[in-house]
Image (tube, rainbow, N blue to C red):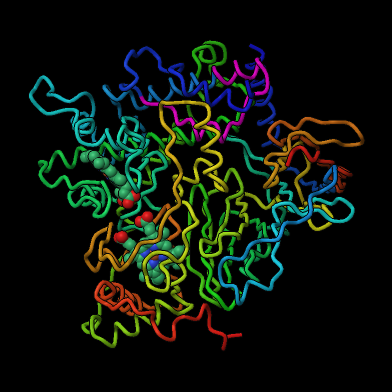
């Protein structure tokens, strides 16, 4: 067998499912990330060492976060974990569909979300392959539609809003009809899966920092080398604290949205917005296209797809798919399309403040950039939004005088 | 069992190393990376966007740049700081770091690789008459600002990055660059001749790591005609006071790319 795929295949089998007979009730290791980060073992000894490390990783993850049927919230001395991850609410969302002994519901996530987002939150549930865009893989802990800047986690309210409104124009439904505490429970569970996923990725990174094959928090190490064990424990704790801390700090970093000027929807403002849309400062035309149909730049991929390979995901995915691995599935890479702005459908919400946040902060995980910090005032952004909102009603003729790719006079 | 002994050894070393950080002596390291084989001719890039401006820039794929004498450009070299290790002490001359510019120029990134210390200013600039966006896929702090012509956007990274972070421009998909972020200033990138030098390193044992965008970690190289294994591109070297450690010619086999 091609040695390059040993690791990938190992991770694809039920090999690392410790003590559970139903694979669905287990969190899967993030095999693409592990393959990409740790590379291929070169000989039998390395395979064995890696196998130990990955089994350790799996055990550490279970120790920290439990299983889908019995989730834990990691205990940390210096972080208020409960604010970010409420154990009570998480128990409501976790587990098989049904009721706890005291009558409270449980299994909300598996009932409403898992068939798209997967039990592990890998975005690869049974229906995922048929959807465009694909359901979100939470494990990278990147979210698109939020009130915070790029690189900052969404707030609890951002997640609540997505659950209540859904994502128009995609398969993500609205869960408006669920009870308020159920929405809260699901939002906490999304955070739980995202935190769990990011901690796993960071622990995989940590493996590359250790000596090759060095066991991690292995019972053997605990017995033989208590201080090494303690040191490793410290690193793991630090990692978890760091990840949870990011979520704790999100609400302090919400982007302030200034009130739009009174005349922001006037014809003059729309014209100004249009000039900016096609101009070199805002430059929306480059991706959204001359007719704003979303056809300006179509060869790029989003970050979840680039995870497979950042240069040529299609080719790499083919290699994985050729292995015949059925579960967990690798979704066929599809290039990301800039939005067709003539459809009048806004995935992150249609309120002016939603659009302001999209244009000001960009859309995380996608090519859509943040507005330039200088050269574009808030008023300018409001004008651009006024123009964008007018687009579905504008005639489709090629905008005159804006056909130039860049201003020649600037040269 | 053997592994655990190894672990102890590396722990002991950690302790040793943090001790060294207070030393008064400073040395340097240099070397030259060579592409061992016949390098492929640089491939021209298909300019699919902004033809008018980018079309005549004779753009080529720069993921592998080798000079006539085999010098390998853009090998990234830095002192590796493992978890729990203390970063090397910073020489007084390096305490204040000038801003580093990462420019969008002639439809490519210039330089292709920029190195910054955490807290140091990186200026994302655009010298072209067309707009670019610079998407940096940093693990800890991803950014993606749009840069209009003439833009100069100061940016700081607060946490070190394990790997060089890829920079790209979504408008001009052929553009690729790399940002290296470490918690100390001891990093370098090989020049056109394949040469690098890092000065003012505290004396003592340090682990150096070597990475190239096409080859990844340089784990198999040859020095003085002998093949050497650098696991994950790492090698521990001793830096002596007032001395320059010269690695000489380090050959990277063509098969690594």
Residue A370 in view: no
Is A385 covered by the magenta stretch?
no
The boundaries of the magenta stretch are: A27-51
Number of dots carrying numbers: 0
Residue at image location 46% in from the left, 48% down from the top: A303
Residue A242 location (% of width, % of height): 43, 41
In this rendering, the answer to whether A178 lies above or below A381 is above
Residue A117 location (% of width, % of height): 31, 37
Residue A52 location (% of width, % of height): 54, 17
Is A42 covered by the magenta stretch?
yes
In this rendering, the answer to whether A400 lies above or below A119 is below
In this rendering, the answer to whether A222 lies above or below A194 is above
Magenta region, main secondary structure: helix
Residue B7 in view: yes
Q: Residue furthest front?
A: A397
Q: Nearer the viewer, residue B171 or A37?
A: B171
Q: What quarter of the picture does the N terminus of chain B occupy?
A: top right
Residue A226 location (% of width, % of height): 53, 17
Q: Is residue B25 left or right of residue A36?
A: right
Q: Nearer the viewer, residue B237 or A23?
A: A23
Q: Is residue B152 left or right of residue A46?
A: left
Residue at image location 76% in from the left, 48% down from the top: B201
Q: Is residue A45 left or right of residue A319?
A: right
The image quadrant that residue A24 belongs to is top left
In this rendering, the answer to whether B83 lies above or below A164 is above
Residue at image location 65% in from the left, 56% down from the top: B115
Q: Residue furthest right?
A: B224
Q: What quarter of the picture does the C terminus of chain B occupy?
A: top right
Residue at image location 61% in from the left, 85% down from the top: A411
């Amino acid at each position: 067998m091609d040695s390059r795929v040993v690791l990938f295949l190992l991770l694809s089998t039920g090999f690392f499912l410790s003590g559970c007979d139903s694979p669905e009730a287990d969190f899967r290791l993030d095999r693409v990330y592990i393959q990409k980060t740790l590379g291929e073992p070169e000989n039998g000894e390395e395979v064995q060492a890696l196998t130990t490390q990955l089994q350790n990783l799996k055990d550490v993850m279970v120790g920290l976060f439990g299983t889908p049927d019995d989730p834990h919230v990691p205990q940390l001395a210096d972080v208020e974990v409960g604010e970010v991850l409420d154990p009570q609410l998480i128990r409501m969302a976790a587990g098989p569909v049904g009721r706890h002994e005291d009558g409270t519901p449980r299994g909300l996530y598996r009932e409403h979300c898992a068939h798209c987002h997967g039990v592990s939150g890998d975005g690869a549930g049974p229906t995922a392959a048929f959807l465009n865009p694909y359901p979100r893989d939470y494990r990278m802990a990147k979210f698109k539609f939020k009130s915070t800047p790029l690189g900052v986690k969404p707030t609890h309210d951002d997640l609540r809003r997505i659950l209540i409104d859904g994502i128009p124009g995609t398969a993500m439904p609205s869960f408006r009809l669920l009870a308020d505490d159920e929405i809260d429970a699901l939002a906490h569970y999304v955070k739980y899966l995202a935190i769990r996923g990011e901690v796993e990725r960071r622990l995989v990174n940590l493996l590359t920092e250790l000596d090759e094959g060095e066991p991690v928090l292995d019972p053997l190490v605990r017995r033989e080398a208590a201080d090494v064990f303690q040191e490793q424990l410290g690193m793991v704790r630090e990692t978890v604290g760091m990840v949870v801390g990011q979520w704790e700090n999100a609400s302090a970093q919400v982007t302030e949205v200034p009130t739009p000027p009174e005349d922001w929807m006037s014809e003059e403002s729309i014209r100004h917005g249009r000039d900016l849309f096609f101009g070199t400062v805002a430059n929306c035309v480059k991706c959204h296209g001359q007719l704003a149909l979303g056809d300006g730049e179509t060869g790029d991929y989003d970050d979840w797809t680039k995870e497979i390979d950042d240069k040529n995901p299609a080719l790499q995915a083919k290699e994985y798919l050729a292995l015949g691995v059925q579960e967990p599935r690798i979704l066929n890479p599809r290039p990301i399309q800039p939005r067709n702005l003539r459809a009048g459908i806004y995935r992150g919400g249609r309120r002016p403040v939603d659009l302001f946040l999209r244009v000001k902060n960009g859309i995380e995980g996608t090519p859509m950039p943040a507005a330039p910090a200088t050269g574009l005032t808030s008023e300018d952004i409001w004008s651009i939004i006024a123009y964008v909102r007018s687009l579905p009603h504008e005639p489709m003729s090629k905008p005159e005088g804006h056909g130039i790719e860049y201003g020649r006079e600037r040269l | 069992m053997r592994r655990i002994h190894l672990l102890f050894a590396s722990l002991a070393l950690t302790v040793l190393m943090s001790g060294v950080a207070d030393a008064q002596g400073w040395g340097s390291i240099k070397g030259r990376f060579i592409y061992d084989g016949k390098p492929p001719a640089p491939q021209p890039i298909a300019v699919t966007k902004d033809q008018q401006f980018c079309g005549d820039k004779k753009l080529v794929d720069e993921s592998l740049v080798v000079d006539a004498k085999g010098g390998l450009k853009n090998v990234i070299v830095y002192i590796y700081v493992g978890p729990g290790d203390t970063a090397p002490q910073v020489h007084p001359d390096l305490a204040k770091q000038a801003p580093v510019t990462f420019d969008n120029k002639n439809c490519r990134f210039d330089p292709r690789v920029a190195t910054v210390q955490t807290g140091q200013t990186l200026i994302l600039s655009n010298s072209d008459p067309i707009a670019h966006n610079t998407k940096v896929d940093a693990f800890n702090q991803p950014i993606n600002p749009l840069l209009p012509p003439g833009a100069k956007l100061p940016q700081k990274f607060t946490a070190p990055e394990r790997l060089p972070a890829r920079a790209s421009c979504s408008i001009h998909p052929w553009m690729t660059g790399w940002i290296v972020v470490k918690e100390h200033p001891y990093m370098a990138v090989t020049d056109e001749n394949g040469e690098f030098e890092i000065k003012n390193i505290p004396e003592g044992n340090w682990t150096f790591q070597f990475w190239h965008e096409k080859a990844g970690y340089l784990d198999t190289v040859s020095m003085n005609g002998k093949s050497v294994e650098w696991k994950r591109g790492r090698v521990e070297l001793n830096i002596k006071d007032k001395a320059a450690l010269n690695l000489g010619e380090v050959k990277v086999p063509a098969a690594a790319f």
